[in-house]
Amino acid sequence: DAKTTQPPSMDCAEGRAANLPCNHSTISGNEYVYWYRQIHSQGPQYIIHGLKNNETNEMASLIITEDRKSSTLILPHATLRDTAVYYCIVRGGNDYKLSFGAGTTVTVRA
Amino acid sequence: NAGVTQTPKFQVLKTGQSMTLQCAQDMNHNSMYWYRQDPGMGLRLIYYSASEGTTDKGEVPNGYNVSRLNKREFSLRLESAAPSQTSVYFCASRGQGANGYTFGSGTRLTVV
């Protein structure tokens, strides 16, 4: 799996958009970018994933650069309940495994 | 509710004792996984089962064994627990073509 690099922590104001960056400069052509989050003591929760195109669902948007070497997860209107560790993971389409790094600890403040 | 169920939620073992962590999913998923998470760390893969009847080692398999009992159940066994195995253990599953993995709520294991 390609290695990902994320900032260790970031703060966000409640109600504002949270933009979480991720670098994956060694990503290969068949590898997807996945985002998960882990709220304190709970199991990780799937957020979104993409290959080349930008993606949006009810939780977030994923913006992938044209060269696919980096991506940004956008939480459009952060709430206190979005406080969590966010993991950016790169996984091949035929790969069964997810490899978790240290992630970004996001703290949403009132 | 559909999902991944792990039992027990909490366990304290003495060094050298054995135990089995149970995991069951009711989503008809093919692949199942066991991860461990140490304090302040990301998750590390212990073992996985790509389909019923198959199991493979992950990053940190030493000291563990697994059994894919049937499509629903994937158990993790510690034959002789050590303090280094104190951790939170998460089970996960994923279906064919499914977007994401579904994780259980974890088993918090302490070995003293």
Image: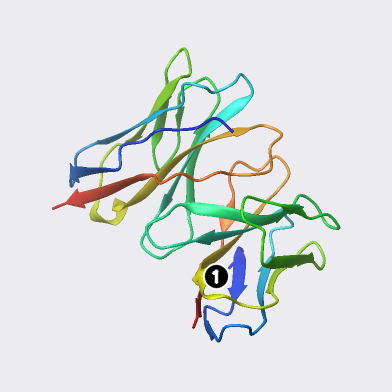
In this orientation, does residue B98 appear?
yes
User: Going 20% across and 44% down the picture, which residue do you hit?
Assistant: A11
Which image quadrant is residue A8 in? top left
Q: Is residue A58 above or below residue B29?
A: above
- In the rendered image, residue B101, in percent from the top left (x then y), is placed at 59, 50
Using residue A43 as the reference point, say whether residue A110 is left or right of it.
left
Residue carrying label 1: B85
Helix, strand or loop for disc 1: helix
Give the residue type that dot 1 points to: Gln
Q: Is residue A4 above or below residue B24?
A: above
Please, which chain is the residue tagged with disc 1 on? Answer: B
Which residue is farthest left?
Answer: A110
- In the rendered image, residue A4, in percent from the top left (x then y), is placed at 45, 33
Q: Nearer the viewer, residue B13 or A29?
A: B13
User: Going 72% across and 53% down the picture, which residue do you hit?
Assistant: B57
Which residue is farthest top?
Answer: A66
Which image quadrant is residue B80 in? bottom right
Q: Is residue B66 above or below residue A18?
A: below
Using residue A21 as the reference point, say whether residue B100 is left or right of it.
right
For the N terminus of chain A, which image quadrant? top right
Mark 1 surroundings: few (<14), some (14-19) or many (≥20) residues within 10 A = some
